[in-house]
Structure formats: C-alpha cells, structure tokens
Amino acid sequence: MLVACNARQSPVRDAYADTVATGADSVVVGISSSEASFVANLTGFQDPESVRYDAEQDVYFVSNMTGNGSDKDGNGYITRVAAESPYGAALFAVGGKDGVTLNAPKGMAIHGDTLWACDIDVLRGFDRHTGRPIATVDFAPVHAVLLNDIAVGPDGHLRVSDTGIEMTLMGVIHTGPDRIFDVGPGGAITEVANDLRLRQPNGVTWDSSAGRWVTVSFDPFVGEVATMPRTGATRQVIHSSVLGNFDGVEAMPGGAILYTSWKDSSVHVLRGRDDRQLVREVPEPADIGVDTRRWRLAIPLSTLGRVQLWKLDAAVVGQRH
C-alpha cells in the first residue's frame, strides 16, 4: 500500500551554515509488503548513508556524507535522533568542530562506549554519549580505498569492508582492490580477504542466530549475499541476483536477512532461498539500521536527504514483539 505521514518539524544541521534544516514532510516514497508498515519520514539530512541504533540510549545515529563519498573535505557529520520521538535531531559529531575530523562518514557500529564510523580510509571512534573523539585507526598504510561498513563480532573484533570504489562527481568508479579487514585489540589491522570475487563488498553484519558473518556485494551486475565463518576467509554465496548494487545488510534474530538494493530500489528479506521485496520504490537505499526495542527498520535515502522508519512484522523479526 502507498503510505504518507503528517508534516512535523525536526531540526537537522545544515553543514554549510550554523542553521537548522527542515524536518519530516508529507511526501513519502515507498510501498510496503504486508510485513512492514510505514512509521515516519525524516528529512533535512545531507547525504545520509548509515543508521545505527543505540539500545541503551534509545537513539539513532545517522551518518551524513555531505557530498561525494570519497571527498576528504572535512564537512561530514553525525546526528543523534531520539528513537521514542524521532522528530528532533541533535548534532553528535561535526567535522571541523571540537577537534572532530569527519569527511564522508558511512557505516557505523557500537562497541562498548565507542561509536565507530567508517570515513574513507580511516575508522573514527567517538564516545557514544558525548560525541568526543577518542580513537582513530588509520588504514592509509594498507592503502584502503573506501571503507564502507563495519560490524562487531562476538570476540569484540571489528569486521570492516573496503568496497574498492571511488564515489565522485562522475559517479561510482570501481578501482579495486576488494577487501575485508579485521581490526583487533590496539587497532591491529589484518586483511581477511582480498579478491575480486568479493564483488565490491559493502554491507557487513554479524548473524548471531547462525554464528557467522554476512556480507553483501555492491557489484552493479551481480549482487550477492554471502556468509563467512567467525574466523577465516571461506566465503559461501547464499543468494545471487542480476540486480546488483547491494548496500546495507542486517540479520534478524529468527534468521531472516534484510538487505538493500539500489538496482530495484528496494529492501529485501531473505529467508532460506525465499527472497522477497519488503519495502520497494525507495531510491538508492543505503546502510539500514534496526531499532531492536520497537523492531523498526531505518532506511537512509542519501539522494533524498531523508531517513524512513518502517515497523517490521513479527514474521520478519522471527520472534514475538
């Protein structure tokens, strides 16, 4: 069904001036299946790429690239949105202010009191309560091209994808290499996989229900959902499609996998061999996040400067809620 929302206001930073932008509007794109229902449409962001839910604080973190994803222009930022009433956004970390360096932040993950964000060829860590910068892991020595997503494993190690692309005014250019990294104690970087058969790895998540990593590929011609063991580089493709340009991925408690595809402008739900569109007609959906208190799906739409929230049905989550 086609859905709409009531207009409400949500102050979000204008990265080019010390002002605020507009909030939720009444124009909504997106058509849901019976397993997802529209909640809210938040606008005023600038190239939002990733949403990460912090269950303890009950907030959404939203990374804003503010321009081309490969530009080291120092104008990226992260906002924080109250999940209970998601119509107001506060600045969390702003490039160029309070000692913060942010160029084009993308995927994020929470480990302890640290919010990690991928920022081209650097991981930047922030105190998730205050936004104060507290850590940096520089991937320049290993010649990272575009760190895109990050997830935390059961051992506390970080798994990071390098999509091997440049995001420019001319569009997305694949240069390679395509790699997946492990970051251990002390920021030690280990290359887990380096292979063009990774097909431009993008989204990565830990699937606790099956004890495995799940990754999706951004290759424009062959999109793949693949799994990898907790340790090691063995990769098993569990779903392949000619659609391509898969971006974000999340694993549900019941075993379902949600992933986004630019090619068909949809969020998919994959259960075993059954692959279906969960939400469609959402252009270039990026790195999705899941609110585990309300079981809401947050979909960042970079080209539209908005984040959409959708309520997930119990059948998708795989447990009663």
Image: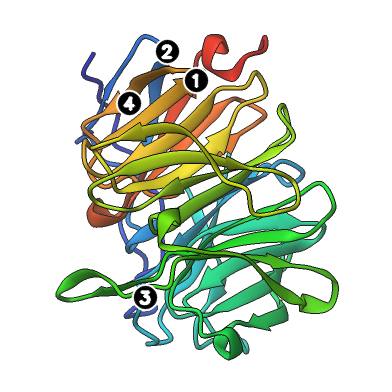
The residue carrying mark 3 is 15
The numbered mark, 2 or 4, whose residue comes first in the sequence reads 2
Tell me the kind of residue under disc 4. Answer: Val
The residue carrying mark 1 is 312
> Marks 4 and 1, how far apart in space?
10 Å
Mark 1, secondary structure of its residue? strand
Percent x, y for residue 160? 60, 62
Report the quarter where the C terminus lies. top right
> Which quadrant of the structure image shows residue 146?
bottom left
Percent x, y for residue 105? 48, 69
The numbered mark, 2 or 1, whose residue comes first in the sequence reads 2
**Residues packed near mark 1 inside 10 Å, few (<14), some (14 to 19) or many (20 plus):** many
Q: Are marks 3 and 1 in contact (CB under 8 Å)?
A: no
The residue carrying mark 4 is 279
The numbered mark, 3 or 2, whose residue comes first in the sequence reads 3
**Residues packed near mark 2 inside 10 Å, few (<14), some (14 to 19) or many (20 plus):** some
Mark 4, secondary structure of its residue? strand
Specify the color scheme: rainbow
The residue carrying mark 2 is 35
> Between tags 3 and 4, which lies in front?
4
Tell me the kind of residue under disc 1. Answer: Leu
What residue is shown at x 21% (from left), y 19% (from top)? 2
Residue 87 is left or right of residue 59, and the answer is: left
Q: Are marks 2 and 1 in contact (CB under 8 Å)?
A: yes
What residue is shown at x 54% (from left), y 69% (from top)? 118
The numbered mark, 3 or 4, whose residue comes first in the sequence reads 3
Mark 2, secondary structure of its residue? loop
The numbered mark, 4 or 1, whose residue comes first in the sequence reads 4
Q: Nearer the viewer, residue 250 or 309?
A: 250
> Which quadrant of the structure image shows residue 65?
bottom left
